[in-house]
Amino acid sequence: MIAFLKSNIWIIIIAINYVLVISAATTILFKNINPTKTLSYILVLVVFPFLGLIVYYFFGQEYRKNKIFNRKNVLNEKVVQKLGNEFRLSPSQLHKLDVFLDSKMKMVKLMNNNKNTPVTLKNELLIVKNGKEKFKLLFEDLRNAEHHIHLEYYILKDDHIGKELIDIICEKALQGVEVRLTFDDVGSKISFKTKRQLKKSGVEFYAFMPVLFPNFTGKMNYRNHRKIAIIDGKIGYIGGINVSDCYVNYKNGTSYWRDTHLRIVGEALKPLQVHFLMTWDFVSNSSCDISSELFPDVHVDTTKAVQIVASGPDTDWANIMEAMLVAINTANDYVYVTTPYFIPNDEIVTALQIAAKSGVDVRMLIPKSSDSWMAKHATNSYLERLLEAQVKVYRYTKGFIHAKTMVVDDLFSTIGTSNLDHRSFNINFEINALIYNEETSLELKDHFLTDLEDSEELSLERWMDRPKYNKLKESYARLWSPLL
């Protein structure tokens, strides 16, 4: 028997592999997920023995609400309900907004069906261009904090800029300010020394879904990609800028990093606070006391309508993707999109194609050089379809553009954490600010057009002439696109 096993060991191992493959493929089929994604997983399982099982083990298992996230959304429902009632628009307010927004009201109504997405009217907004400007403003606001500081980041590193932030919040914690910090355990890198400093100073901090063995399985797939800062419930930040030196262009000789963030003062802070607290409940496995100091009234005279929209594996709907689809489908004049990663679903591609073919000026700005080989070539595999439909595609050449923005018809714009890719729409936890304001939209439009000056426009003829070797790399990366 032993001799038989030794002489047929590889056959036995391969047989065991395919027994497990059949089991995994059957599980995938019964989930009734997107057919493209289903076929991609099955193809990987069948073609790549052992490797396919590892990929599925770490990335393919679907936990969502019923397992990992059954503790998320445990925030007191009365708080959420009270918040929705507080910002429910009167018929006269709704009429005024309807007259201004016209077809964009579909988006307001769509998002209003989500109880955590009320439209807020009284807000002051500041578009923050690049990391140096963001951290200059943020650090000043942090130093002026009196009651609490809430920080939630995908990437937090204790490098030069990260150490400066950590020193500030530790100092504020020692002064008696309540400091709560959560960071994604995959995206972040913090030393034990820094963690001791945080703990000694009284900063409460938790990693989002730690990936230490034995709880590693499946958790690579559900990351907290949000970047949120809230000071005293009065000032908030949301956008694409994480806490790392690359975002502030500290290192000479490295690629220039272009990004966009948003500073908010006003009513939109209350929904933003709710989303932070829901995450905090999840990572800490205990809720903090919901006091009036967390939801202060902020008196702002400026009228700028904002909805804070979140999506992730714990939401019933792909809220951010749906908002973007409605924005594209209702565009009359133009759609300007900036995204560092464009690995979309068919719905987004079709919407962009239809808009462009019906006369809407559709422009997309992506980086020429990417921080991910696979993402770069997967993105390139979608460009020909866009160019054929007369979508204007630009590639940023000054460095790496990481901003995640969209502006439509001088009426609507969005700044947030969501890329136009499958991972942002369906897997990661994301958050965006939907802005219904002409002044803000025009400013973001101006930023977009300025960025085009540091970009190259692709032509269909030139793109189709690219080397076959590049096309082969794109086709290979495209196979993995539902998994990226």
Image (tube, helix red, strand yellow):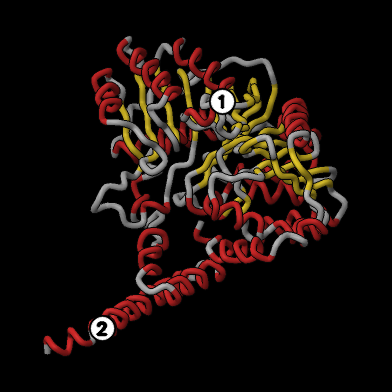
Residue at the disc numbered 2: 12
Tell me which amino acid carries mark 2: Ile
Residue at the disc numbered 1: 131
The residue at the point 39 percent across, 62 percent down is: 61
Q: Is residue 118 visible?
A: no
Quadrant of the image containing the N terminus: bottom left
Label 1 to label 2, Cα distance in Å? 55 Å
Q: Please tell me how crowded label 2 is: few (under 14), some (14-19), or many (20+) other residues with Cα within 10 Å.
A: few
Left or right: residue 346 versus residue 481 is right
Q: Residue 47 or 70: which is nearer the viewer?
A: 47
Q: Residue 322 or 417: which is nearer the viewer?
A: 417
Q: Position of residue 73 (x, y in %)?
A: 40, 43
Under tag 1, what secondary structure? helix
Q: Please tell me how crowded label 1 is: few (under 14), some (14-19), or many (20+) other residues with Cα within 10 Å.
A: many
Q: Against 50, is 373 above or below? A: above
Q: Position of residue 482 (x, y in %)?
A: 54, 61
